[in-house]
Image (cartoon, rainbow, N blue to C red):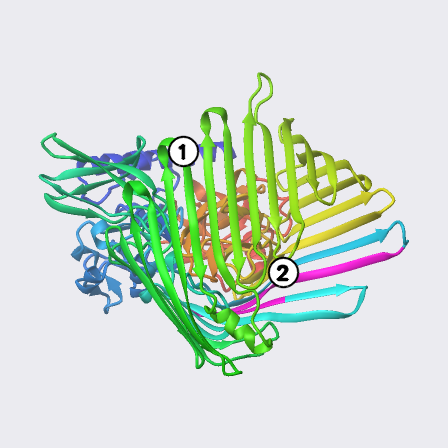
Amino acid sequence: MLIQRYTSFLTVVVTAISLVIFSAASKADNDIQFNTDLLDLKDKNNIDFNKFKKPGYIVPGVYTLAVKINNDSLPEQKIPFYAGENDSDMSRVCLSPDVVKSIGLTEETIKNATWWHNNECLNLTALPGFTAAGDLSSSTLKLTVPQAYLEYRTQNWDPPSLWDNGVPGIFFDYNLLANITRSLKMGNNKYNVTANGTTGINLGVWRFRGDWQTQVANTDSKSDFRWSRLYAYRALPQLKAKLIIGEDYLESDLFDSIRYVGASLRSSLLMLPPNLRGYAPEITGVASTNATVIISQQGRIIRQEQVAPGPFRIQTLSDVTTGKLDVTVKEQDGTEQQFQVDTATVPYLTRPGSVRYKLAAGRPSDVQHHTQGDTFATAEFSWGVSNGWSLFGGFIGSKDYKSVNAGIGRDLLNFGALSLDITHARASFNGGEKTAGNSYRINYSKRFDEYDSSIQFAGYRFSERDYVTFTDFVASKNYSELTGRNKEMYVISLNKNFRDIQLSGYINYSHQTYWDRPASDRLSLMLTKNIDLEKIKNINISLSAFRTKYSGSDKNDDGLYLSASIPWGDTGSIGYSVQTSSEDTINRATYYDQINRRTNYQLSTGTSDKGISAGTYLTYEGDRAKLTANAGYNHNDYASAGLGAQGGITLTNEGVDMHRQSIPGGTRLMIDTDGVPGIPVSDRGVPVRSNYFGKLVIPDVNSYYRNKIKVALNEMPENAEVDNSVVEATLTEGAIGYRKIGVLSGEKRMVSIRTPEGEYPPFGAQITNKNGRDTGIVNDGGYAYISGINSGESMTVTWDSDKTCRITFPESLSQSGNGLLLACMPESVTNSDQKNKLKQ
């Protein structure tokens, strides 16, 4: 009997859909008419087809819907639907000013917009091409908005009007390491516990932060806890800048860094679209017709853009674009222009017409929060004068110290990129001594595409004997004389790839001389080779070598590391390495493997001048923290063990969660899974499952970037389904974002619904749960197939817009089986009354 009823229900649905299609095909603007004489139903008069009369009709009310703009998603919002002013059988969506603001319309579009319903709703008819359609089955409001109405946006980047400052909240991020070592010679134990992290409070646009660190050891009777930095910051989207107040470290491209207490304002490249960050050349030319400009590199198209007749200027190349670019201008008549543009990267080059700046003022301080010295101020800038030329400069000064810098950067096209600058400094010391000196610097870089290599001569810098940096000047307050003044410094680095033989190499050399002490040098070399044999692929061989000569030392610190690894099984590898230095030579064999996606380990054994050794290392990527464990043994020397935990606790008005956290104080996103635990969600890597309260935090999300968070559908728990498997968020730096994923959790059952009078709701009556989610629809004879059923919970049945009743499921669903008979009672009636009335 149940199967026959369900078959009848399917017949009704198929018939209704057929009528809809036929009616829409005959005349799209007409109301859809249903001929109930075609339906074989017991009670044809007890059928509510009014909700199907108009295409896309939604019962007037307020719904919580996820907003989708073209292909982009916004958080869930309260969306009202009102009855049509001229047709009560029509419903009309209301886009409030808050919703309109979140869409990211241009100022001109908003200025020309008109409103209805007491100026509370945007009039879409005044914006051709702008459409809105509600879909209650997926709890989504789909907006189609012409690109001309929207602010500039690119893939994975939104305009400032769509940036989300998140919700108020507090968090505690930590990185804890504990180690114990037993000396096999002395027979005693030493333990050491160290931890560091960031505590934060978010209020509106402000981020209040406290960096902390602590250490406890049995060799020291005192524990050491201190706040290493206390500060607050906020984004200034209009200025594309970041304001910081409190303790900070001077961030400068021209002057040495120093710790201070004060305030700073600096432009942030993170707030710009990715293809406008850093330096990249302009592409200019003249088109004869409506043309397509194609920019490519070694056959790979980087960008295509249509231009109108006349001069064109393309400024939207990514700052990672380097080397020789091929430009083709395809005219409408089939003719083509072709030319090449060379570019290189070097510090201080800025896009034409752009200005980068950094401002700061305050007093120098130490890690104990003590200020020292006089108040100082600094400012610097870099201005893209024209295509290939940049000017930069700045100053830093206090009562007894003044320094000014000026420089120029130039893209030399085929010959690379170059910058030159000079810094002049004057200082007056406590003893009456005065100094004045200059420092000269040159930077150069060049990529050789034809040789798949690059060279960077990142500075020759020469400083005169009487040149004093601000950092040295502040330090002189604590010392009778300055020592270790820099004289010459240069760094040369070279990268080279040999793709044909799968070999890559890197070499770096730095040299630093001083006016009053011996020079220091550092040379490092790295070679990596991949080998594919007939049966074994991806064999990796790596060689690293270095030599360091420290100032004032007669000995060189030399080191060599050679390793080889071979894949073993699906996820494992075995390896051998030899490491030698002036102190010891170690031979080591290792085995690495994964237990699952969350857990990996490494086993090792080796020999050295000190004897035989063995060790193991385990990493577990948990939902609530990242855990590590290690153990080591060296024959007749020591045995050790260690534990580590890295994570955070985030608390907001929406909920609380313990979670992994790699970047202390970083941006994070709290996901609400409708109170359902165990829902797997991730933006990359191993999914995180919602906790007992249905909350989880995705850590380390990118700031000013459209993050896409996905539900791992293949790992969903049984009896759970989601309305929207992907949510998006563009968060400001340090924000605690919040998004909700509609989850329907519970059993699925065929039920029979009756009113106290023995009747049943009409066909088409809608069934919703306590969260307003659609869970089913009533079919012929009061039968309904309902999802998301949980013991003792209630659901609401609605028809004719204003007629409702409530059904409540029994406490023991396992004994009820299919064909469950439920009383649909007015909401004021108790559960016991429902049972009694149904028995009567």
Residue at mark 2? 174
Amino acid type indicated by mark 2: Tyr
Report the span colored magenta: 188-212
Point 18% across, 37% down: residue: 292
- Which residue occupies the extreme top position in the image? 534
Amino acid type indicated by mark 1: Asp
Looking at the image, residue 34 sits to the left or right of residue 186; the answer is left
Callout 1: SS = loop
Tell me the quarter of the picture where residue 462 sits. Answer: bottom left
Tell me the quarter of the picture where residue 546 sits. Answer: top right
Residue at mark 1? 452
Residue 81 within the segment the image draws in magenta: no
Task: Point out residue 835 in the picture as x, y percentages from the top left corner.
Answer: 58, 55
Distance between mark 2 and mark 1 Cα atoms:
42 Å
Taken as a whole, is the magenta stretch helix, strand or loop? strand
| Mark 2 Cα-neighbour bin, 10 Å: few <14, some 14–19, many ≥20 | many
Instruction: Give the mark nearer the N terminus: 2 vs 1.
Output: 2
Task: Point out residue 777 in the picture as x, y percentages from the top left corner.
Answer: 43, 45
Residue 191 within the segment the image draws in magenta: yes
Looking at the image, residue 822 sits to the left or right of residue 19; the answer is right
